[in-house]
Image: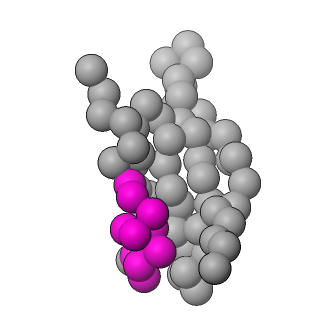
């Protein structure tokens, strides 16, 4: 069984290095240079890996 909600709000607010961070069940947080963050859903269709962008990560203060 896959783990769900590995990323916490505190972990996301910190300055993460650019890369992909898994949150479970195909959901990833994509961090790019300049600290911009967006959600991506990864899935497979007929053996091919696909990425679906779900929008940017909104921070409220």
Position of residue 22 relative to residue 31, above or below, is above
Evaluate whether residue 59 shows in this view.
yes
- Residue 15 magenta-highlighted: yes
Q: Quadrant of residue 2?
A: top left
The percent position of residue 52, horizontal first and vertical second, equals 67, 40
Position of residue 41 relative to residue 18, above or below, is above
Rendered residue at 50%/41% (across/down): 27
Rendered-image quadrant of the C terminus: bottom right
Q: Quadrant of residue 24?
A: top left
Residue farthest along the left direction in this orientation: 1
- Residue 36 magenta-highlighted: no
Residue farthest along the front direction in this orientation: 61
Rendered residue at 41%/78% (across/down): 14
Nearest to the observer: residue 61 or residue 32: 61
Q: Check the image and tell me how it is coloured.
A: one colour
Nearest to the observer: residue 12 or residue 50: 12
Position of residue 9 relative to residue 42, above or below, is below
Q: Which residues are magenta?
A: 7-16
């Amino acid at each position: 069984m896959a783990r769900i909600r590995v990323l916490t709000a505190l972990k996301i607010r910190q300055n993460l290095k650019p890369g992909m961070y898994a949150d479970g069940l195909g959901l990833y947080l994509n961090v790019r240079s300049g600290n911009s963050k967006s959600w991506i859903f990864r899935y497979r269709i007929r053996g091919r890996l696909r990425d679906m962008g779900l929008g940017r990560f909104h921070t409220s203060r």
